[in-house]
Image (cartoon, rainbow, N blue to C red):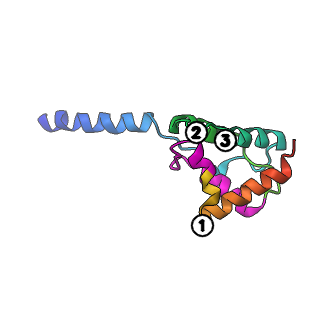
């Protein structure tokens, strides 16, 4: 009986972890036929986030972009950047860190630059 009681906190802790804070939305499952206006609005929100915004503030906007999805016909590298940016494991410490991604000389940086290019070409005000 004491083994059962000793295991109870572990079981409760695992259950609590499963019920809280786990965002299991997979960016690969995000819509690939979003309206251009929904995509543009969600991406613009991220681009315009203040530099001093918190990680939590940026995450909300990342989740908004995930919910919007991407329009049909988006280039593959731009879609890859979308999937990276909206992945629940990717956190930006502030708005400046998000905007700096496209400047990084990495695969993610290059893809982010392609997403910014797609946005500029598609979401002309």
The mark total stands at 3
Q: Left or right: 1 with respect to 105? A: left
Residue 28 visible here: no
Q: Is residue 63 above or below residue 81?
A: above
Reading the chain from its start, which is encountered first: label 2 or label 3?
A: 3
The one nearer the camera, 98 or 8, is 98
The one nearer the camera, 16 or 37, is 37
Q: Which residue is mark 2?
A: 58
- Where residue 30 sits: x, y (%)? 68, 47
The secondary structure that dominates the magenta segment is helix
The one nearer the camera, 72 or 59, is 59
Q: Which residue is mark 1?
A: 105
- Magenta residue check for 80: yes
Q: Quadrant of residue 17?
A: top left
Please say if the residues under marks 2 and 3 sit with CB atoms less than 8 Å apart: yes
Reading the chain from its start, which is encountered first: label 1 or label 2?
A: 2
- Where residue 83 sits: x, y (%)? 64, 53
Residue 45 visible here: yes
Label 1: how many Cα within 10 Å (few below 14, some 14–19, many 20+)? few
Task: Tell me the CA gap for discs 2 and 3.
Answer: 7 Å
> What residue lies at 52% left-to-right and 36% top-to-bottom?
54
Q: Secondary structure at mark 2?
A: helix
Reading the chain from its start, which is encountered first: label 3 or label 1?
A: 3
The one nearer the camera, 48 or 91, is 48
Q: Left or right: 47 with respect to 100? A: right
Q: Which mark is residue 76?
A: none
Region of the chain picked out in magenta, as a range:
75-99
Q: Which residue is mark 3?
A: 46
């Amino acid at each position: 009986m004491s083994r059962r009681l000793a295991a109870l906190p572990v079981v409760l802790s695992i259950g609590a972890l499963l019920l809280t804070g786990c965002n299991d939305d997979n960016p690969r499952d995000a819509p690939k036929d979003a309206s251009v206006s929904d995509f543009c609005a969600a991406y613009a929100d991220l681009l315009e986030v203040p530099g001093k915004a918190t990680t939590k503030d940026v995450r909300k906007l990342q989740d908004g972009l995930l919910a919007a999805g991407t329009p049909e016909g988006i280039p593959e590298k731009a879609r890859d950047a979308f999937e990276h940016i909206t992945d629940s494991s990717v956190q930006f410490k502030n708005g400046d860190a998000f905007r700096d991604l496209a400047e990084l000389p990495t695969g993610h940086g290059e893809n982010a630059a392609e997403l910014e290019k797609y946005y500029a070409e598609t979401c002309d005000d």
